[in-house]
Image: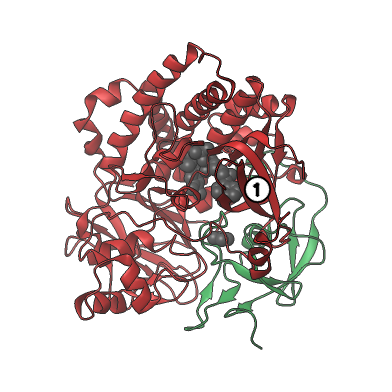
Chain colours: A green, B red
Amino acid sequence: MARNPIELAGARPGPPFEITFDGRTVTALPGQSVAAALWAAGILAWRTTRRGGRPRGAFCGIGQCYDCLATVNGRPNRRACLVPARPGDAVTTQQGDGHER
Amino acid sequence: MSAEPYDLAVIGAGAAGLAGAVHAAGQGLSVALLDDAAQAGGQFFRHPAPALKAGRPQALHHHWSAFRELRSRLAASAVDHLTGHHVWTVTRDGDLPWAVHALTGADGEEQRPVCIRARALLLATGAYERQLPFPGWTLPGVVSAGGVQAMLKSGLVLPGRRIVVAGSGPLLLAAASSLATAGARVPLVAEAAGYLGYARHPGALAANPGKLAEGALHAKVLARHRVRLSTRSAVTEVHGTDRVEAVTVRRLDRDWRPLPGTGRRIACDALAVGHGLVPRIELATALGCATRQAPDGTSVLVLDDRQQTSVPGLWAAGETGGIGGWQLAAVEGELAALAVAHRLSGRPAPARVRELRRRRDRMRRFAEAMGAAHRPGPGWTHWLQDGTEVCRCEEVTAGSIREAVAELGARDARTVKLLTRAGMGWCQGRMCGAAVACLAAGGGGAAASEERRPFAVPVPLGTLAALDEPN
Ligand SMILES: Cc1cc2nc3c(=O)[nH]c(=O)nc-3n(C[C@H](O)[C@H](O)[C@H](O)COP(=O)(O)OP(=O)(O)OC[C@H]3O[C@@H](n4cnc5c(N)ncnc54)[C@H](O)[C@@H]3O)c2cc1C
Ligand code: FES
């Protein structure tokens, strides 16, 4: 019986690569979205809300809820569930609408 | 951009759109197939990107061979498959061809505006999940049930190790069985409805043995992994500070009102939740297409017996005409393709149309019986506390929405939105629409939200301005 999804799907991706999340190194697999790479590292939140400053991450998983907005390589408001992770990407927690600070 | 319009533009490359595109091409039509994703498949047939090199993608799909066949027919056809195209509006001037406007890129952020012209249009945009809020549902680790499926099927990842599944509808069983198969512990599936609801429609059930077999398949997987299913139960609270640590599950009465004294706490690190699906029809409602309320409480497109909407030249298939699953979607896509070919070429419709209509009607009856059984009961609003966020984007609480209704006299979702900003954020009310419509109607149940949005995806101002320029 499969212990994890990679085994279950018989996946043999190319070599993993590194991205960073708030400066910390995270390993991603070729073909994963930014959100998938963060989930695989146990990270569930990468945005804080505009009013309450509360943590949020992926919710709908299909590009519809906009809760997964992250700042990727300095550009805010990227839907992490849709954007593919690329080697060297710097993902940072997006504060509010991402335009302050 | 070609000057010659396509015969048919299909929006959405799920089961409905794929079937529509390949069958239209088979009838000799020139076809453009637009979808926001990088790969065909839609929600049900979502699968890992090629770079993940999944040797056994069928491990997460019961019907992978059906998709493989559609995909190879697409590859062998002359259909122009336009991936990464986010359609934000559709326009038509008089008798000129339809103009389909899209933004490109993984998340539409490449923002290269594209316009595709076609003589006929098939809307196969599928659905998104219906959410009903409850205390703690905004905590990281609470994910939509379909979203968990989508992230698992495409990225081969899980949000946690111990995942409670809750809400209502057949998608919960599918999600729970994928999660368990992929190695997660699923301590409980909490279904708010009583499955007995189906028994009231024995005719529709008997005519759809395939659907029953599918349910039985999930049940078998769940039994093998010792996953418990509690009907008439709901997660009414999530605990944790920065992420999910536990949930409280309560028994419900027939109206989905929590029964006092029945709460039990279950430790978990994630919750997958959803209360059925909502058709994605805003491109059509913006054009004035007629809608009706389906038995599940959602607003769906009114279609004639050959899948045409109330707007001539615009056909629809799959979830846009009512939630019904991928098999029904594929049948409707084929039926629509034959209807469009018949209309454009004037040739007599093939005899197959009658058989497709028969299958469609049979599956629709079943889907409507199922939708009625899982329609939210009016008591769900008793899950809410005043501080519960209803609108995730604008952080609007149940308390302020109730105040707008009780004290400021709001009677519909639009007025509530103007008074509180609920539904005004990035998602344009997709996540809170169902809940706000119920609260505005002064009670619970499933009031259909309007599904009217100016654009199907957020659009930069520059693109809007460029629309006026002749091209
Ligand atoms: C998140 C989610 C997960 C699901 N998982 C399952 C499951 O595991 N099992 C199951 O039986 N059913 C599942 N379903 C139900 C699913 O709706 C149907 O089974 C089936 O996929 C319906 O086929 P369809 O062709 O009508 O729509 P879909 O398969 O949803 O296809 C619609 C396509 O259109 C695209 N699209 C929509 N709007 C636009 C636009 N404006 N511009 C460009 N492209 C657009 C979408 O991205 C999608 O690719 C899920 C539904 C959702 C919402
Ligand atoms: S998780 Fe909903 S948009 Fe990305």
Q: Badge 1, how many Cα within 10 Å: few under 14, some, many 20+?
A: many
Task: Kindly tell me whether residue B61 is visible in this rendering.
Answer: no
- Displayed-image quarter of ligand 2: bottom right
Between residue B308 and residue B23, name the one nearer to us: B308
Q: Position of residue B198 (x, y in %)?
A: 25, 34
Residue at 27% over, 77% down: B404
Residue sitting at x 68%, y 50%: B115
Number of marks in the rendered image: 1
Q: Which residue is mark 1?
A: B37
Q: Nearer the viewer, residue B259 or B45?
A: B45
On what subunit does the disc labeled 1 rest?
Answer: B
Q: Residue at x 39, y 28 (%)?
A: B211
Please, is residue B403 above or below residue B234 in the view?
A: below
Q: Nearer the viewer, residue B58 or B46?
A: B46
Res B138 → quadrant: bottom left
Residue B128, image x, y percentages: 47, 51
In the picture as drawn, the residue positioned furthest to the bottom comes out as A101
Q: Quadrant of residue A88?
A: bottom right
Q: B105 left or right of B379? A: right
Specify the quadrant that holds the C terminus of chain B: bottom right
Question: Left or right of B191: which side holds B218?
Answer: right
Circle 1 — which element?
Answer: loop
- Residue farthest along the front direction in this orientation: B94
In the image, residue B16 lies at what x, y percent? Answer: 53, 34
Note whether ligand 1 is within 8 Å of mark 1: yes
Q: Is residue B84 above or below residue A17?
A: above
Foreground pick, B131 / B343: B343
Above or below, B184 against B388 in this view is above
- Place of residue B9 in the rendered image (x, y in percent of width and height, measured from the top left): 62, 38
Q: Inspect the image, locate mark 1, and give the three-letter code of the amino acid beneath it.
A: Ala
Q: Is residue B291 visible?
A: yes
| Lateral position of residue A22 relative to residue B19, left or right | right
